[in-house]
Image (cartoon, helix red, strand yellow):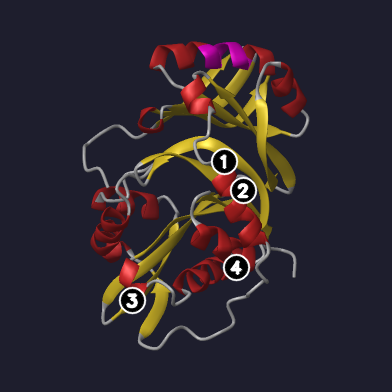
Amino acid sequence: MTTKNDIYYHACTEKDERFIMNVCLDPFNARLRVDDYRGDVRAMHSRILELVEQHSFTKVFIKSRQEDWQTFLSLGYMLEGVYKKYFNGNDAYSMAMYFTDERRTSDYWMEEDTILRQVLALPRKLSDESLALGYSLRLAVTEDAEQLANLYGAVFQTYPTPMNDVSYIKKVMLEGTIFYIVEKEGKIVSAASAEINATYNNAEMTDCATYPEHRKHGLMRHLISALEKELRRRHMYCAYSLARSLSFGMNAVFHQLGYEYTGRMTKNCNIFDKFEDMNLWVKNLSAK
């Protein structure tokens, strides 16, 4: 993982008398993300174009409300996926706009289609089996931040957020992100997190990593299942994740745990060693 002290992202609010929107300026991933908004979509779009030019971004994506996604479509955006029940039970539509051919063009789309077909053919496999012998699972605390940073730094050459930074991990924990970890002989060997959006009662399953020598024990299924139980306890019922489209293993985990594939986002983020396509998986945690 890169260890430069780059600015990964900056969250801000853009507004005038016609609109207000919560924006993430993300130079590390060369993109602008709109997570929430109210008001005139066309006026908002004009401001987005100004920000893209100002920061030389190559992609914009917006979590659109149901009543607005066709307006975004008419402005030149494309629909890449659906976050089912994202807005307190109402769907969010992932609308994207690209600004270079290179960013718009996937290098591995057919290979990713093959992987997806293989994943969707797998039977569901709920995590009711016991954790592998010698492994234990628990909720992480801030004292685990250094080991977590070491794990993410070892597994990912690059990552969309600075998860190899101890202070950053402590920061997101204090802001409400939940981490579950698997340990063996007192060492963290696998981890995953749920980034909670308390406003809309949803959570992103993310930061999934396992040291290579501890893979093939089904650890990630146990971690995701534990996070789901914690989210239900907190009355969060929309869970979603963006999985690398080239990763058979991570896509298989979400499919087998009952998540639904709802779209693919082209070159969405800088992860592993390049800009990669990401598959969107969504689960209604209130359903049996």
Instruction: Kindly identify the amino acid type of the residue bearing the numbered disc 4.
Output: Arg
Instruction: Kindly identify the amino acid type of the residue bearing the numbered disc 1.
Output: Trp
Tell me the magenta residue range: 44-49
Q: Residues within 10 Å of mark 4 (few under 14, many from 20)?
A: few
**Foreground of the two, 159 or 197:** 159
As helix, strand or loop, the secondary structure at mark 1 comes to helix
Ranked by sequence position, the earlier of labels 3 and 4 is 3
Q: Can residue 203 be seen in this view?
A: yes
Q: Which residue is drawn at 31% across and 62% down?
A: 142
| Whole-percent x, y for residue 8 in the image | 34, 35
CA gap, disc 3 to disc 4? 23 Å
| Whole-percent x, y for residue 97 in the image | 58, 23
Ranked by sequence position, the earlier of labels 4 and 1 is 1
CA gap, disc 2 to disc 1? 6 Å
**Foreground of the two, 113 or 91:** 113
Ranked by sequence position, the earlier of labels 3 and 2 is 2
Ranked by sequence position, the earlier of labels 4 and 2 is 2
Image position of 227 (left or right of 118): left
Do tag 4 and tag 1 residues touch (Cβ < 8 Å)? no
Do tag 2 and tag 1 residues touch (Cβ < 8 Å)? yes
Indicate whether 41 appears above or below 284. above
Residue 233, numbered label: 4
As helix, strand or loop, the secondary structure at mark 4 comes to helix
Do tag 4 and tag 2 residues touch (Cβ < 8 Å)? no
Indicate whether 78 appears above or below 169. above
Q: Which residue is drawn at 49% across and 55% down?
A: 247
Dominant SS of magenta comes to helix
Question: Where is the C terminus found, in terms of image quarters?
Answer: bottom right
